[in-house]
Amino acid sequence: SRPTGTTKQKVVDVHTHMYPPEYISLLKSRSSIPMVRTFSNAPEPRLILLNAEVDLVAAMESGSSSTLPGRPLTSHYSDLAQKIHFMDTHGIDISVISLANPWLDFVPSADAIPIATSIAKEFDDMCSSHPGRLFFFAALPLTAPLDSLNAWVPQLKKAKYCRGVILGTSGLGKGLDDPELLPVFEALETAGLMIFLHPHYGLPNEVWGPRATSNNEYGHVLPLALGFPMETTIAVTRMYLAGVFDRFKSLRMLLAHSGGTLPFLAGRIESCILHDGHLVKEGKVGPSRRTIWEVLKEQIYLDAVIYSEVGLKTALQASGADRLMFGTDHPFFPPLTSDEQGEWESVGLNAEAVTRALGSGTQEEAAVMGGNAVVRSPLGRSGVGSTVRW
Ligand code: URA
Ligand code: ZN
């Protein structure tokens, strides 16, 4: 059933991933994370991505554990027909697909440009096989020599269905407040391409303690529920403190998972700045300073992938109903006790949170479910069609 009820507004999923076949082959050729690995006690190959999963691989190899690491690599990760089936099942008209983590962060420098180019083409071709239903965020060749990376970004304008880039938090190895990244941000701003900021690295394993990492008592809960959102929060706060948003005022960023914890912590960030003797002495807290609240309302968009009305209302208060956009995080978080070809509980939780926070049948609900992505945000930049600008 359609998550928006009876409204005619298109439903758009801005947070939905794929690993195209070429990327899966790459993962199959690897023996460290990220990798695809087959184990004798499992029917399906396993997709092993996270640092928090490494100890379990070792335990499996040494025979001290029979718990399978990672997640089953189902057809949902790489099969386009499966993505379209998922969209149809959930009443999603348009998906803005992106490569999932860790993108091309691990690719050897010399391979980065050819692989990024070929993956972008694979995505553009997938989109062109379902015109009007699919658009994509490209993955950047961040390990390429800087000059080639900077020259690559403007080329994305030629990809018909590209609407932005998906970016992790590591940048060139020193995070997103690295001055060396400024030309990349400038090129993205000039091209009108949105940045979809997405976590992968979480927090160091020590934070979770031995019961989590050695004994696997808590599954993936700590890194996914807490590590991912903190990582996003830290990355965007570092960009803010480094003045990236002041420098590139037309740069637009979509933050995964409703901004991590940024909406909740924005007041504390502000207060810590105002009360920081060092920053005040350096003249960084003057009257012309843009607050994090202003950046949230002017340059930042938040997805609605937070699974509850409480978090979504915080996001809403921080950024506004015109800056929130529905997402699913498909193919992650599949249902474990019902048919994967049917409705996904994880999708239902996010759609229900939108309805509860914005009100059933309201214009704001329709805006968050799709209207904001189509018309108001830079994602709708290029005037495709008459009413729907995708
Ligand atoms: N787990 C991941 O590794 N990535 C996602 O996007 C969601 C869950
Ligand atoms: Zn995701």
Image (spheres, grey):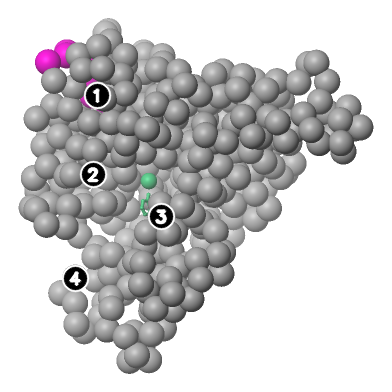
Above or below for 315 versus 256? above
Mark 4: which secondary structure?
Answer: loop
Q: Nearer the viewer, residue 184 or 273?
A: 273
Name the main secondary structure of what is drawn in magenta: loop
Label 1 and label 2: CA atoms lie apart by 15 Å
Q: Amino acid at mark 3?
A: Leu
Disc marking residue 346: 2
Going by the numbered disc 4, the residue's amino acid type is: Glu
Q: Residue 275's image quarter?
A: top right
Give the position of the C terminus as an image quadrant: top left
Which one is earlier in the sequence, the residue at label 4 or at label 1? 4
Report crowding for label 2: few under 14, some 14 to 19, many 20 or more residues within 10 A (C-alpha): some
Q: Residue at x 91, y 32 (%)?
A: 281
How far is mark 3 from mark 4, CA to CA?
22 Å
Q: Is residue 178 above or below residue 212?
A: above
Report the residue at 20% width, 60% height from top: 74
Amino acid beneath label 1: Thr
Outermost residue to the bottom:
63
> Which-is-in-front pick, marks 1 and 2?
1
Per the image, label 1 sits on a secondary structure element best described as helix
Residue 105, placed above or below residue 383: below
- Dots 2 and 4: beta carbons under 8 Å? no
Mark 4–mark 1 Cα distance, whole angstroms, equals 36 Å
For the N terminus, which image quadrant?
top left
Task: Please identify, in this view, whether the residue under mark 3 or under mark 1 is nearer the observer.
Answer: 1
Q: Which mark is residue 355?
A: 1
> Which residue is denoted by mark 3 in the rendering?
224
Along the viewing direction, whichever of 253 and 150 lies nearer the viewer:
253
